[in-house]
């Protein structure tokens, strides 16, 4: 019995495509809210967005952790890659009423305090101090938000440039108010307090399993649980 060429090609295409679709999870079905199940005294939520970004949070005891970034799928593995999506923090000068430190910095030192008013400090911000003469010095804010450099008494502070440590972005330059320059201590606020919270991880792999997603790391306590979508309401 003769089989037409068109029929043969159609059958061959069907045979080739079937195994691929069966072996790979449908990426379009992955986005949504997932909740951790099976780990005692630990609450965790994962949101996979259709635009390829994710938000993750975990709470246990008095500890809260979070991460956000992009997610990718390859085969039966979903990888969460933490990052800022190419965004950079924005800064402003503290209002005088927001300042809690009124006394001047120690002689010979210039101090930049980075954080969010009444919330907390921000570490890991590179601060470039610039004097009226053009002389500059650079320091990175530490855990308490302070970035400190030494400057001769003859120099007068005029502005500060801020950016994340390790960033290739341009500095965001802010003028230092005269009173703050005289005291040699100024404070700079990040406009979004979310930047105060570090990423809980840089990369996290999850396997697509029956019922949801499972952390693909045997040494992680989360591997005992399952991230599952809530049962759909009928």
Image (cartoon, grey):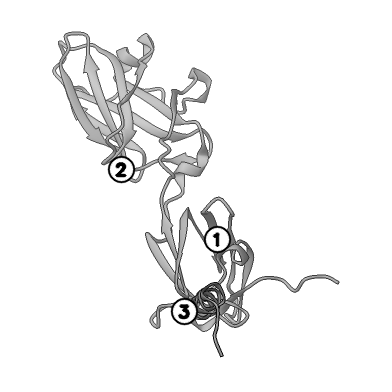
* Residue found at the far front of this picture: 1
Viewer-closest of 22 and 3: 3
Q: Quadrant of residue 154?
A: top left
Mark sitting on residue 221? 3
Classify residue 119 as left or right of residue 180. Answer: right
Please report whichever mark, 2 or 1, sits nearer to the chain's N-terminal start.
Answer: 1
Classify residue 228 as left or right of residue 78. Answer: right
Rendering coords of residue 132 (x, y %): 22, 9
Q: Quadrant of the C terminus?
A: bottom right
Please report whichever mark, 3 or 2, sits nearer to the chain's N-terminal start.
Answer: 2
Q: Quadrant of residue 110?
A: top left
Q: Residue at x 63, y 80 (%)?
A: 211
Residue placed under numbered mark 1 in the picture: 57
Local crowd size for mark 2, using a 10 Å CA cut-off: few (<14), some (14–19), many (≥20): some
Q: Secondary structure at mark 3?
A: helix
Q: Does 26 sit above or below residue 183?
A: below
Kindly indicate whether the residue at mark 2 contacts the one at mark 3 (C-beta within 8 angstroms).
Answer: no
Q: Nearer the viewer, mark 2 or mark 1?
A: 1
Q: Quadrant of residue 86?
A: top left
Q: CA distance from mark 2 to mark 1?
A: 25 Å
Q: Residue at x 36, y 9 (%)?
A: 178
Local crowd size for mark 3, using a 10 Å CA cut-off: few (<14), some (14–19), many (≥20): few
Residue placed under numbered mark 2 in the picture: 142
Rendering coords of residue 231 (x, y %): 75, 74
Viewer-closest of 117 and 166: 166
Q: Does 170 sit above or below residue 14?
A: above
């Amino acid at each position: 019995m003769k089989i037409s060429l068109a029929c043969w090609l159609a059958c061959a295409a069907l045979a080739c495509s079937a195994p691929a679709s069966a072996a790979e999870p449908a990426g379009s079905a992955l986005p949504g809210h997932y909740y951790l199940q099976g780990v005692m005294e630990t609450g965790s939520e994962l949101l996979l967005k259709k635009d390829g970004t994710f938000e993750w949070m975990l709470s246990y005891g008095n500890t809260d952790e979070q991460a956000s970034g992009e997610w990718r799928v390859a085969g039966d593995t979903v990888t969460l890659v933490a990052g800022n999506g190419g965004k950079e923090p924005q800064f402003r000068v503290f209002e005088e009423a927001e300042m809690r430190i009124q006394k001047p910095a120690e002689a010979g030192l210039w101090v930049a305090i980075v954080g969010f008013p009444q919330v907390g400090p921000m570490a890991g911000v590179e601060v470039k101090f610039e004097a009226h003469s053009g002389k500059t010095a650079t320091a990175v804010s530490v855990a308490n938000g302070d970035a400190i450099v030494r400057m001769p008494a003859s120099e007068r502070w005029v502005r500060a440039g801020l950016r994340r440590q390790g960033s290739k972005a341009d500095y965001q330059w802010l003028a230092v108010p005269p009173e703050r320059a005289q005291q040699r201590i100024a404070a700079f606020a990040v406009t979004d307090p979310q930047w105060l919270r570090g990423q809980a991880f840089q990369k996290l792999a999850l396997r697509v399993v029956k019922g949801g997603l499972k952390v693909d790391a045997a040494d992680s306590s989360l591997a005992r649980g399952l991230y599952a979508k809530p049962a759909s309401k009928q």
